[in-house]
Image (cartoon, rainbow, N blue to C red):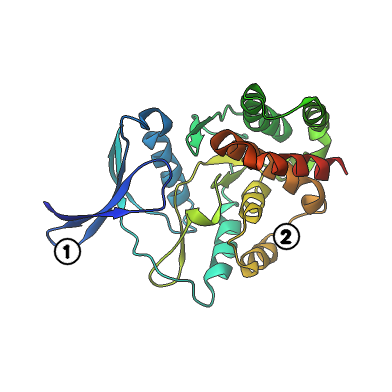
Amino acid sequence: MSVTATTPVGGGCISPAARLTLEDGSHIFLKWTTTADEGSVDFDAEVASLVALAGSHTLRVPIVLAHEARWLALEWLEPGSPRPGTWQALGDGLARMHRTRGESFGWPSANRIGSLPQSNTPHARWPAFWREERLLPQWHLASAAGHFDADDARAFEQLCARLDDLLACGQREGPSLLHGDLWSGNVHILADGWPALIDPACCYGHREVDLAMADLFGGFDAAFFEAYDRAWPVTDGYAESRRPIYQLYYLLVHVNLFGAGYRSGVRRALRAIAC
């Protein structure tokens, strides 16, 4: 079936994207790589995450239509606006998605967080996974670029030494299927007002990681968190210690992607954890 129109779609910071209109009036979402961004995307990894989320039979994700190394074609999800119940449905659906469990903490292959590589080597212990596969790679990258001083390094090292105790709750609760990059831009509100998830970077990990990311930069209605907490309450210590530990990873990612403007957020998180 031939393409009759191509409309650029904004919102992505890595790959260009467009809505393709076919001769029967239907639409397809297409994104692709250019020579400049060829090494910063991994459509195979994105497809694996989308398939896993769809397999949880909880929240809507776009159907994968076709893909190759340099492009990805997805079901077009007509955008809309939130309505009463949208955010409650997202919170409840995420809690149900987190009930999909893995055998270990990690993922069958590496993927990407934004344009950065994200290692997912499986671990039996959650604190080890978060330290070795999340915090340390981003810290080393940021430190090599000169973003942090000796005091910062000392605070980070002290945190890493305490992770077994601080993240013991994640070990007890076990590995849940995570979206992995749950900021507001990766929640797509459909034309009927219901939520869908896009651009995942999945792994099996502690469920509170998705909540911490959702809470980091705003954009989520309070009804989302309230609905999640009704479905599966977080345990004591989340706000005081585990949330800043999980947010620290995403703040380091932002330092490495966008520069020193996010350095103060890293330092605030380290101070919050130390208290």
Q: Which is nearer the N-term, disc 2 or disc 1?
A: 1
User: Which residue is label 2 attached to?
Assistant: 233
Answer whether residue 103 is visible to the viewer in this image. no
- The reply to whether dot 2 and dot 1 touch (C-beta < 8 Å) is no
Residue at disc 2, secondary structure: loop
Of residues 262 and 91, the one drawn nearer to the viewer in this rendering: 262
Q: Find residue 275 and report its horizontal and vertical position in percent.
A: 88, 44
Distance from disc 2 to disc 1, alpha carbons, whole Å, reads 45 Å
Left or right placement of residue 6 versus residue 9 in this view: left
Of residues 190 and 165, the one drawn nearer to the viewer in this rendering: 190
Q: Amino acid at mark 1?
A: Gly
- The quarter of the picture where residue 271 lies is top right
Q: Amino acid at mark 2?
A: Pro
Badge 2: how crowded within 10 Å, few (<14), some, or many (20+)?
Answer: few
Q: Residue 25: which numbered mark, if any?
A: 1
Answer above or below: position of 138 versus 49.
above
Which residue sits furthest top? 144
Left or right placement of residue 122 versus residue 46 in this view: right
Answer above or below: position of 124 versus 63.
above
Q: Find residue 250 and report its horizontal and vertical position in percent.
A: 62, 41
Left or right placement of residue 54 versus residue 131 in this view: left
Answer whether residue 37 is visible to the viewer in this image. yes
Answer above or below: position of 3 versus 40.
below
- Residue plotted at (69% across, 63% down): 229
